[in-house]
Image (tube, helix red, strand yellow):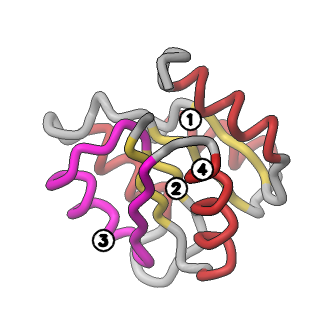
Amino acid sequence: MAHILIVDDSPTDVRVFTTLLEKAGHRVSSAATAEQGIEMARSMRPDLVIMDVIMPGMNGFQATRTLSRDPGTQNVPVLIITTKSMETDRVWGLRQGAKDFMTKPVGEKELLARINKLLGSSA
């Protein structure tokens, strides 16, 4: 069981991901803004962060870059899940430090497979 932090401003997406992840045995926390997500990641040290891109204020690319450069959170893998589907978005997200990138909507099996891979299959 892993602790996963969801950073997404959509209550619907948070609810869907939370239900799916809890059903798979994970513990879930969530933040509605990138700024709140960064603070929660620093204080909670989750095993994985699911990051949206399009949010008010700081976007998910900026938050991913912040987490990947912070010594306290740089080892926490970030999985970007967004509606942005251009190849340039995927490349940019990975350049900011994300370990994987998925486009919404995501399938349950594919999401869990990617999460298990990022967690080293220990979850």
For label 2, the residue is: 51
How far apart marks 4 and 3 lie (CA) works out to: 23 Å
Identity, as a three-letter code, of the amino acid under mark 4: Leu
| Mark 3: amino acid | Glu
Residue 35 marker:
3
Q: Quadrant of residue 32?
A: bottom left
Question: Is 17 included in the stretch rendered in magenta?
Answer: no
Secondary structure under the numbered disc 1 in the rendered image: helix
- Check contact, mark 2 vs mark 4: CB within 8 A: no
Q: Which residue is mark 1?
A: 94
Given the image, on which type of amino acid does mark 1 rest?
Answer: Leu
72 vs 61, nearest the viewer = 72
Task: State the extent of the magenta-drawn residues as a range.
Answer: 27-48
Few, some or many residues within 10 Å of mark 1 (<14, 14–19, 20+)? some
Please identify, in this view, whether the residue under mark 2 or under mark 4 is nearer the observer: 4
Q: Earlier in the sequence, mark 2 or mark 4?
A: 4
106 and 23: which is toward the camera = 23
**Residue 41 magenta-highlighted:** yes
Q: Position of residue 84 (x, y in %)?
A: 75, 60
Task: Please report whichever mark, 1 or 4, sits nearer to the chain's N-terminal start.
Answer: 4
Name the quadrant containing residue 53: bottom right
Find numbered disc 2 in the image and state the secondary structure of the residue it sits on.
Answer: strand
Which marked residue is nearer to the observer: mark 3 or mark 1? Answer: 3
Between disc 4 and disc 3, the foreground one is 4
Residue topped by disc 4: 21
Q: Is residue 105 found left or right of 35 in the rendered image?
A: right
**Mark 2 vs mark 4, CA separation in Å:** 14 Å
Local packing at callout 2 (Cα closer than 10 Å; few below 14, some 14-19, many 20+) is: many
- Label 4 sits on a secondary structure element that is helix
Residue located 21% across and 52% down the image? 44
In depth, the one of 104 and 69 nearer the eye is 104
Residue at 72% over, 40% down: 111
